[in-house]
Amino acid sequence: MIRKLMELPPIQREILTALINLARQKGTIRGEEIAGVIDRNPGTIRNQMQALKALGLVEGVPGPKGGYKPTREAYEALNIEDIEEEVPVPIYRDGVLVEGATVAEINFTTVRHPYLCHAAIKVLGDIRNFNIGDKIQFGPTPVNKLRIRGDVRGRDDTDNVILCSILEMVSLPKKPIREYIPDKMVFVAPNATIQEAARTLIEHDIHGAPVKDKGKLVGIVTFTDVGRAIAEKKMKSLVKEVMTGDIITIDAEQTLNDAIKVLDEHKIGRLVVTEKGEPIGIITKTDVLSELAVY
């Protein structure tokens, strides 16, 4: 039975951590490479590798391109989940992506403190260039799209953990967009007057509606379009003359995170949500913000 994390000497934990980090990128790793990363004598690495092999934590690979590989037990010894098809969680240092690194675990501390929120971020990858005061960003995570921004307040090289003070943290629900749109879809006719369009928007307490002509979606009209026509003294304008014809849509099965990307990319305030090509609703920036407000 392998030793648990707390029973492994610091030097062995440090070597195992470096081996796992390097092996994720290159496969088989030579002792000299590990020595260079953790700034130890190659002879020390070789001696410790014999002990780690005896514990079943390291596998030796013979041949000119040989070296060492971590076993599944090595991941267990360091409390690291070995995921076959992992989705990397990116890490940024001072706005620059840290190549080959991913978040393995996030542990929040001081969550009850009225002014501070700290986290211990276990990382797979090289963290030795992180220093106190560096700006750090993690995420998004694959499921809940969690993003964290903060400042580095410490580093534990033995366990490959970055300690940070959290300044911003955002997470988006993973439910599909269909969960956030009204049950009833409101349309406006292209030949309706802007006064009729305004009454429809006010009656349903919405700021925009798709325009449908003979069963086909031809545009979208908003209060901004109506207000612009009034400001330009085009009081007799029809909806088809003031609407936006370039319709940006998103599928109902996509997520809020997908919606945010499309809204930002096109610099717009609302999207038409479709299902099998048919419009079923509208989602706006306000809808997204309201979902982020948790009470």
Image (tube, rainbow, N blue to C red):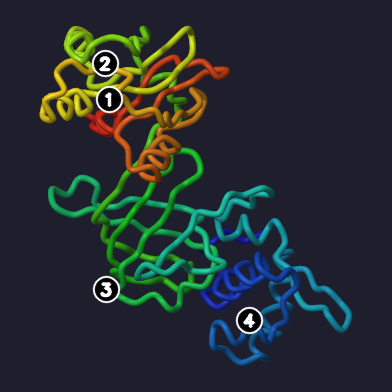
Contact check, label 1 and label 4, Cβ < 8 Å: no
Q: Position of residue 17 (x, y in %)?
A: 57, 69
Q: Which mark is residue 242?
A: 1
Mark 1 neighbour density, 10 Å: few (under 14) some (14–19) many (20 or more): many
Please state which amino acid type lies under the numbered disc 4. Answer: Ile
Q: Which mark is residue 34?
A: 4
Q: Which mark is residue 238?
A: 2
What is the CA distance from the residue labelled 1 to the residue labelled 4?
66 Å
Q: Position of residue 69 (x, y in %)?
A: 74, 69
Please tell me which of labels 3 and 2 falls first in the chain: 3
Q: Position of residue 174 (x, y in %)?
A: 45, 31
Contact check, label 2 and label 1, Cβ < 8 Å: yes
Please state which amino acid type lies under the numbered disc 2. Answer: Leu
Mark 1 element type: helix
Q: Which one is nearer the viewer's eye here, 89 or 206?
A: 206
Mark 2 element type: loop
What is the CA distance from the residue labelled 3 to the residue labelled 1?
52 Å
Mark 3 neighbour density, 10 Å: few (under 14) some (14–19) many (20 or more): some
What is the CA distance from the residue labelled 3 to the residue labelled 2?
58 Å
Contact check, label 2 and label 4, Cβ < 8 Å: no
Please tell me which of labels 1 and 4 falls first in the chain: 4
Please state which amino acid type lies under the numbered disc 1. Answer: Val
Mark 3 element type: loop
Tell me which residue sits at (70%, 56%) in the image: 72
Mark 4 neighbour density, 10 Å: few (under 14) some (14–19) many (20 or more): many
Tell me which residue sits at (37%, 37%) in the image: 172
Question: Between tags 3 and 2, which lies in front?
Answer: 2
Residue identifier under label 3:
133
Identify the residue at the far right of this view: 63
